[in-house]
Structures are given as structure tokens and as C-alpha cells.
């Protein structure tokens, strides 16, 4: 017999498919209910949540598209335009709250992903990352890009896994087709800020992480209160 909850999920998926929103039954980011307690911002297209494994002392957020997409580069032009607007708002919120610029952004564009659903990391830390990544992947092509749409255009042509990052120099870079282990950029960022024990989110002190996540929710929820109107 199908439970009420299972029936609700089945109906929700069918409705979303009818309006052109893709979901993956096995993806944790496709179910708002699993993220609900951590959501600090939400609009029609994106969620903002503090991640498990707070490398910084709070304020480490993820921007997650509601539609199931493998990576930011796989978005269409309209989705990327919406994403850019959301990225700018999250950046401004964190920079304003922490009086810090530039904050660190990164994405495992399929390479090194642990959740197979696009999500962009925002860490309120200033990190020098490029030289370390060049050292780790000396044979791989690294490109500086100047616009988010450029990431989309390049990925559409190449269809290769990538690492994306924006660090202390405020430059956006992409490393193409690296054999990056899971959570690679998390580990690099954690080492760069002197907290290597927080690199793997599964190994982080649970009590500390829960406290930092709770503080982050309280700190940011009011800053994204207007998102629902957009």
C-alpha cells in the first residue's frame, strides 16, 4: 500500500515534470523537504543553504538550482542568467555580513562531485588557490574566464568535467578534465585557511558543525527574506 508521503512525492514529481522542472529520484538536492531546516533563501529557481562541514566558522553557503542539473556549465542561457543574479545576491549578503571581499567561490563541475547535482560553494574566507591547483594538475588546461556565460559556452562545446574557482585574486578559473578526488576543492580550501580537519565534511566534529550551521541559519535567514517575491 502506498503511504500518503509516497503519494505526495509521486504527485509532486509528475507536476514538476509537467511544468518542465527535472528531478532525480535518488538526488538529495532534489527534495526540498530534506533541506528544509537549513534553507536561508529560496525563490522559484534556487535554494540557499548552509552546507554540512562548515570550513569557515559559519557562513559557508551553497546555491542549489531546484532543477536537476549536473553542473552550472550544463545550464541553458536563461538558467545561467537567473543563476548569475542569484550568485551576485549571495556574494553581496556574505560580503556585507562578514565585511570581507573577495570571498571564495568554487564548484566541482562533475569532477570531484559527491552529490550529482549542480551546487556552487560560497566560503567567507580569502583563499589563494590557483597555484595549488596548477601544482596538483600540471598537465591539465586551466582557463581564466571573465563571464559566467563563458563557463556555460565552454562546457557546451567541450562536455568535459571541470573544477571552477574564484579565489583571493578575484579571478574566475576553470581546470578542465582533472582526475580530482571527491571533495577536492573543499580539502584545498580547508588547508588554505588552516583547518585541514574540516576538509572532508563527513569527518568534521558533528557538534561543532551543527552549532555553526544553526548560527548561519539565524544569521542569514532575514537577509534573504525578500527572495520569495522574486
Image: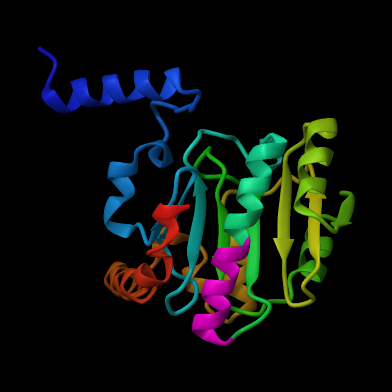
Q: Is residue 98 magenta?
A: yes
- Left-right relation of 108 to 214: right
Q: Residue at x 43, y 18 (%)?
A: 18
Q: Residue furthest front?
A: 229
Q: Position of residue 46 (x, y in %)?
A: 48, 48
* One can see residue 111 in this view: no
Residue at screen point 49% across, 76% down: 56
Horizontally, residue 192 falls left or right of residue 201, namely right
Magenta region, main secondary structure:
helix
| 170 falls in the magenta region | no
Identify the image's colour scheme: rainbow, by chain, secondary structure or one colour: rainbow
Where 219 sits versus 34, above or below? below
Judge by depth and name the residue closer to the eye, 29 or 208: 29
Region in magenta: 88-99
Q: Residue 213: where, in percent of width, then height?
A: 34, 69
Image quadrant where residue 75 sits: top right
User: Which residue is farthest top?
Assistant: 1
- Nearer to me, 29 or 76: 76
Split into 4 quadrants, where in the image is the N terminus? top left
**Which x, y percent locates residue 83?**
61, 49
- Residue 13 location, x and y as percent? 35, 23
Amino acid at each position: 500500500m502506498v503511504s500518503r508521503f509516497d503519494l505526495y512525492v509521486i504527485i509532486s514529481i509528475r507536476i514538476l515534470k509537467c511544468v518542465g522542472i527535472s528531478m532525480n529520484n535518488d538526488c538529495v538536492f532534489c527534495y526540498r523537504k530534506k533541506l528544509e531546516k537549513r534553507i536561508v533563501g529560496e525563490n522559484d529557481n534556487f535554494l540557499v543553504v548552509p552546507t554540512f562541514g562548515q570550513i569557515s566558522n559559519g557562513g559557508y553557503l551553497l546555491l542549489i538550482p531546484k532543477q536537476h542539473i549536473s553542473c552550472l556549465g550544463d545550464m541553458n542561457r536563461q538558467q545561467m542568467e537567473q543563476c548569475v543574479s542569484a550568485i551576485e545576491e549571495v556574494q553581496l549578503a556574505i560580503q556585507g555580513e562578514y565585511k570581507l571581499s573577495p570571498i571564495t567561490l568554487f564548484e566541482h563541475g562533475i569532477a570531484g562531485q559527491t552529490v550529482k547535482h549542480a551546487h556552487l560553494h560560497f566560503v567567507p574566507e580569502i583563499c589563494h588557490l590557483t597555484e595549488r591547483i596548477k601544482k596538483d594538475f600540471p598537465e591539465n588546461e586551466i582557463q581564466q574566464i571573465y563571464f559566467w556565460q563563458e563557463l556555460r559556452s565552454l562546457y557546451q562545446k567541450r562536455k568535459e568535467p571541470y573544477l571552477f574557482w574564484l579565489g583571493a585574486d578575484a579571478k574566475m578559473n576553470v581546470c578542465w578534465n582533472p582526475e580530482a578526488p571527491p571533495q577536492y576543492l573543499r580539502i584545498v580550501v580547508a588547508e588554505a585557511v588552516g583547518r585541514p580537519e574540516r576538509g572532508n565534511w563527513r569527518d568534521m566534529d558533528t557538534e561543532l558543525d551543527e552549532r555553526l550551521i544553526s548560527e548561519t541559519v539565524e544569521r542569514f535567514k532575514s537577509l534573504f527574506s525578500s527572495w520569495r517575491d522574486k
